Image (cartoon, rainbow, N blue to C red):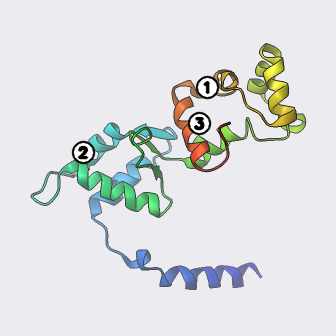
Amino acid sequence: VMSEIKKVVEEVVKKEKYVNEVVPYEWLRVLERLQAPEQASSIPLQDVIEICRECGFSAREEASVEVQVEDMLKRFNDLGQLMHQQEESLHDVVILDPAHYLVNAATRIICRFDMHEDEFQEKARSQMKKQYDMLRDKGILDKKLLTILWEDRSEHISNLQELLIKFGFFVPI
């Protein structure tokens, strides 16, 4: 059964236009650098631009390095290789590992607390019991809890919050 599914998926994928689309070699060099194991789950856009320059991007008559970087990021975003948002407040960060960046953060808030309580949730429960109980029992999140629940990613709290609202995981009330 699995081999048949794999065969069907391969046939469908081969028909997609992006599979045979040619991209500049520099793009592949950049993607390789961005996907290196030592990379964090996100990186500032300015760091991506610098990596692009190191990989051979240069200003051309038809497009600046920044425009070329935006084109590359859009393509890789569309292909699911990374996430780069166009909203002004999210534009300056490139998410290299969306699962780690978003899913791990979201599961500290959207979960079965009785089954999955980690040290951050434990700390939130002990320091902000009333707010923690509202989240656990009614699904109402007090923003103040995020400083504890996302303590290990404090510099990303506003980006995470905005992305989780954008994708419908959080609903502001």
Distance from Cα at disc 2 to Cα at disc 3:
32 Å
* Contact between labelled residues 1 and 2, with CB atoms less than 8 Å apart: no
Q: Is residue 39 visible?
A: no
* Contact between labelled residues 3 and 2, with CB atoms less than 8 Å apart: no
Between label 3 and label 1, give the one nearer the viewer. 3
The quadrant of the image that shows the N terminus is bottom right
Q: Is residue 50 visible?
A: yes
Residue type of the residue flagged with mark 3 = Gln
Extreme residue toward the right, this view: 114
Mark 1 lies on a secondary structure that is helix
* Contact between labelled residues 1 and 3, with CB atoms less than 8 Å apart: no
Q: Is residue 30 above or below residue 136?
A: below
Q: Is residue 75 above or below residue 15?
A: above
Residue 54 — which label? 2
Name the residue that disc number 1 marks.
Answer: 152
Tag 1: Cα neighbours inside 10 Å, few (<14), some, or many (≥20)? few
Residue 171 in the image, given as x and y percentages of width and height? 67, 42
Mark 3 lies on a secondary structure that is helix
Extreme residue toward the left, this view: 61
Residue drawn 60% across the image and 50% down it? 167
Residue drawn 70% across the image and 81% down it? 5
Residue 109 in the image, given as x and y percentages of width and height? 74, 36
Distance from Cα at disc 2 to Cα at disc 1:
30 Å
Residue drawn 87% across the image and 33% down it? 137
Name the residue that disc number 3 marks.
Answer: 161
